[in-house]
Image (cartoon, helix red, strand yellow):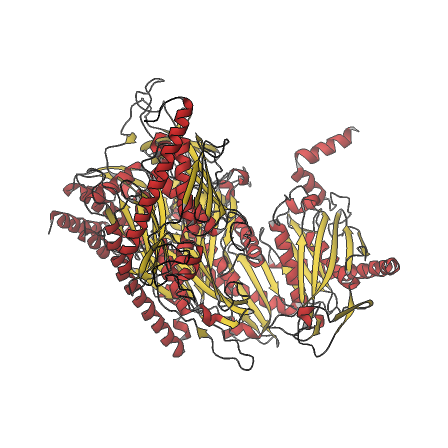
Amino acid sequence: MAGYELLSEQNLRLDGRKADELRRIQCKLGVFGQADGSAYLEQGNTKVLAAVYGPHEIYRHGAGGASRPTLTATSNEQAVINCQYSAAVFSSGERKRRPRGDRKSQEMSMHLRQTFQAAIKTELYPRSQIDIYVEILQADGGNYCACVNAATLALIDAGIPMKDYVCACTASLMNDRPVVDINNLESTTGGPELTVAVMAKSGEIVLLEMSQRFHVDHLEKVMDLAMEGCQNIYHILDKEVRAHVSKRGSLLGWEAT
Amino acid sequence: MDAQSSVSEFKGIQPLEYFQQHIENGIRVDGRRSLHDFRPVTISQGTISSADGSAVIKQGNSVFVCGIKLELAPPNPNEQNKGFIVANVDLPPLCHSQFKPGPPSEQAQVASKFVKEVLENSGIVKLEDLNIKEGKLSWVVNVDIMCLNHDGNVLDCALKALLMAFTDLTLPEVTLQEDDEAVVETGGKIVVNNEKRSKLTLHSKPIACSMAIFDEKILVDPTEQEEALAESLVTVVLDANSGDLVHFYKPGGSSISRQKMQECTGLAKKQYKTIAKSIDQAGVVTKMDSKQSK
Amino acid sequence: MPAEMELDPDNVSAKSSPSARVVIPGDPVPEIPPSDVVILGPGLRREGPHAIVTRPGVLRHKPLPSSAEKLAPKAIYWVDTHAKRYVAARGEHVIGVILAKAGDTFRVDIGTSEPASLSFMAFEGATKKNRPNALPGDVVYAKLLVASRDMEPELVCVDAYGKKAGMGVLSGGGFVFTTPLHVIRKLLSPDCVLLKTLGDSIPFEIAVGMNGRIWVRCKSVKETISLANAISVAEYMNNDEIKAMSAKLVNALAGF
Amino acid sequence: MRDVPLSNLERQFLLDALEESKRLDGRSTPQRRPLELHFGRVEGTALVSVGETQSDHASLVYAQASASIAEPAVSRPIEGMLNIFVTYCGSAAARFADAAGTAGGDEAVEVTRLLERCLKESRCLDLESLCIVAEEKVWQIRLDVNILSAAAGGVADAASVAALAALAHFKRPEIHPVSERDPVALAIHHYPVLSTFAFFNRQKSGSNAEKIVCVDPTWQEEQVMAGKIVFGVNPYREICTLHLAGQLLIDKSVVLRYAHVASQHAKSVVDLIKNQLHEDTQKRLAGQTEEIGFAFAFKQNSILQNVKPAEMVSTANLEHV
Amino acid sequence: MPVKDKALELRPLFAQLGLLGHTDGSVMFSLGQTAVICGVYGPAEVKPHKERLEGATVEISLRPPSGPTGLQEKAKEAVLKGLVESSILGSLHPRTSVFVSLQPLDMDGGELAAAVNATCLALMDCSISMRCLFASVEVTRTEDGIILLDPSQKQATKAVAKATFVFESVNQDVLASHLEGRWSEKAFQAGLQAALDGSKAIFQFYRETVKRKFSKELMMK
């Protein structure tokens, strides 16, 4: 498509990966002192910072507001999740005019909120609010996924109870073959992009997004690969969390078992 | 002393009654002797040297400035032989406490729309006159009317300021290098001769006369307070050259009968000639000054 | 205000005979005498000596009763109008949805321009310690104690004797739906056979709020849905049509 | 302004009814509501209503396409542009009645993005045919979608039909320096249509039990649902948009199943658009100018009607009860 | 003044009340082929900073058929606001708001007049207490002085001047006026007279519409 051969004859992609290979993920928990929880994550060249504040009392003028009309009972029964997605003006090739507030950022904020409203045990914190801020420092495809993964780590760092890890991953279709975790070049020149966020252990889908078109018959294999990608990401995140906790724990004087 | 303080108390506590008593006696709160009198008008032209045409008008306590700035631009592809007029009325927070900082207030937008409509209806400037070379270059006339002190009758004042600024306006001579296709884009081949300036032909002279209706009585040139207490407001715009009705603006408020309407137009007709004359005289006096200052 | 003329009562009754008719705002009603011997109900007001219509609808009147009845010595005129938005009126029963708790009161949405307040103490048997058990989103059937254009409406769930008299939190299932206000007036009018006809064959419980909300509960979900539909549909039916529709509904529910 | 709140009783009743596979408006769970489509007098305008067209329980969406000449984006010098703007009008619901014009907030963003994905990112419009001079001048198509009533829910679905219909109906002026040629229709590659599926958790059995799925949810159902899937599918069964959100955990097979249902809906919608378009074109050709436009549609009483004929309501509602 | 009879007739009027489910009053209105949808809420909740103790706050939101809301819409909103404020009995509902939302659908001449008439019908459907009704008509004048009442876009192409008048129903007084182009005194009076005659037909139409709405009610009792 469009002049590029995205998948070579040896089934290698432009950046040398195999079709089912993720980009390198590096992450770190607890990077800020100010926030209640924070994390930094690199997925290939996509770099994200996430910070979590809360639970605290509800501020009326949160960035965003409820996506559906505020239901009478909701805030009395469960925590309000407030998310803000922002991409630094220097994060992509052309300078962005404004870091947030444009339609795509608003949508991204909305999706993040929906995702974490489902994953966090919100019923434990009635009449409270939890803020999740994510900042894209460098964008190279799969922004939503990187945000979800980083926010999951930040929430864990903040000690907020969740039902499960939420992991997100993208997948696409090249020459009728599914490929996982696509980068910016692949997504702009290539075909469709499918984004999945799943609960890692139960395998249930929290969010599913797709753009561009492809035939229904291909949906299953692309989705399968994306979900497999989520599982792999889960293992990477989980390893880092365990390492982080045992390190912190050992500093506090208890032995990691 | 005593009487004075009781008057000011009366005014403060029962503004409507205070006002009513004046009107019943055929005088105005600001000291005018007749319901049909205008407040004194002073006009100066060419006060803003950075503008291509300007005027300041003071009508009672209402003060308005109008500045006209010229720009060059390629004409609209659909109307290759026309220029542009962009008119805007601004009521900034400094002119009255009722205006807050931020986007233009509803009143300012309505006034802008009114001025625009009068410009179109009266045909004061022919857009064809603003064309320099067909399909290549035209004048953009940016008219900005700003209120410095708001004491009623925004529409009259704005229109007077506009008219005076237009009479003051001079256009520099512009020559366009021929047989070059990319003249306008490059901008290099346009020669503007600021020394040689010419007047714009004005095809009409729209004069507005605003009236407030209060208890079946018509108050000409209402102040801000009178406007607030009035039942409805009417603005009649007549062309001083032809006597045609250019605009009859009545934005809601309580209804007026057809007799009242006729009475309003009648009053306006009586007034517009004197206004036109006073404007002309004011213009002549100050024009000399402005020339010297330039 | 010009002084209103006193008018001969005989003259009044002679004038107030024309049948009901459709009127629109601004219409004068010449048959209403320029005096205080009539009561002007909703949709009418006086301007000088004349009565003027302010809301569109059907002009109705209750003629001057015979002089034997001393209790209501005035003729009543009003306009039957169609509206969806409720304006609170004192003493009316309404169905509200609790929005929030604020101090010792509930804020209750009754469809008016501002929420009504309902004190925790305005329930049967309520004391400082024994607070009513209601949450935001719950539905209450209550009576308007205070309703004025300048004040927040106030609800109570007890009558003058401190008894609940059918009012309180509506619990145990059932369905709430909204209809235009004139449907409520029709349902409650003594001439309307709808509820009686339906009740003959389907047992149900109902609470009717003057604010256009109706709560119904039947034995099954199916019956409740049918009943709610039947009530909404009856808006444009006369009594014969209502009877026919009820019969059809009962048959359908029975499985024919 | 505040909306009328949905009470706990209504929520519970709705869920109880769904447990028995019953819906308040008498539909079965996989049943859609009828759609009505009308074209305006001006080319590129469409009005879509969805819901009980015999009462005021209907949603109403108006879409208008217009064109202007603009400079192309640097990254795509030979392509025209399509911009979509969704506004919730004050009449849609009380919460949108605000003169300051928040224009629907998050809800408008959601519908806008869904339409953008469905129509823009799926490249259903042939943007290259909108190029006039490469790198200099291209046609910019502006699509305004105004939600006039949200009384029956299903706004996104109706908006996609209205938007697509407006694009199909639109004719842009032909730029030609010599003669004034007839306006030309836009080149549309394929017709993707949104369909929404609402998911509800079963109350009694465990969380693993299969979810209850409602096609084309009403506004009450939208308030109570646990989550939803929105598909943008064209009649060729190609997925253009997929959006799953809410507090919902869904199995993969479910997604696949409803993708097929959505494509059937797309087919019927595209048939509707094509039929109506054909009728409209015929009338225009025949010069029956009196019989085109919304005013004519109003008079036909086909767009909604507030008199509920007794026959229809009482029996129609009972069929599925 | 040469005046043709046909020129002084209104185009066919049509109104369907109460179609927007979430509003308190609504109408689909058409004047010839010009079509407008209008929805009204009221007396409804008011924002604290807009609250007025002496009466209802009126807000108008007029959407353009396409593109962002511009100066033109703002000016029309101001006219409509004045009309609604002077015709409803707002003092009966202090600290509330009356919100009018308008969407023009098809434009074929007389857009402002159609918006005004739709607003009046929607207010009636909402059953807000009103002092009087209002009706609006557009008139145009051609070069040779012919007055046309309520012309369609096509008929108005020859017009050199346009005027829209709004009348109230009780005394047939003028509530608002809006002029485009130049009018001589005489032509203006002729136009005003034509518009006044036209408005009578609109008031009659209002009555018919309300009669239709209440016809069942009358029959029932």
Left or right, residue C112 beside residue B187: left
Residue C179 visible to an observer of this rendering: no
Displayed quadrant of residue D286:
bottom left
Q: Compared with residue C198, is residue A11 higher up or lower down, i.e. above or below?
A: below
Q: Quadrant of the N terminus of chain A?
A: bottom left
- Who is closer to the viewer here, D82 or D91? D82
Instruction: Please state the horizontal and vertical placement of residue C134, each as a whole percent of the image.
Output: 32, 28
- Who is closer to the viewer here, C241 or D130? D130
Left or right, residue C191 beside residue B39: left
Seen at 35% across and 44% down, the residue is A233
Q: Quadrant of the C terminus of chain A?
A: top left
Q: Compared with residue E208, is residue D187 higher up or lower down, i.e. above or below?
A: below
The residue at the far bottom in this view is D178
- Who is closer to the viewer here, A150 or E202? A150
Displayed quadrant of residue C69:
top left
Q: Compared with residue A110, is residue E150 higher up or lower down, i.e. above or below?
A: below
Instruction: Please state the horizontal and vertical placement of residue D168, each as a whole percent of the image.
Output: 39, 68
Residue A19 visible to an observer of this rendering: yes
The residue at the far front in this view is A10
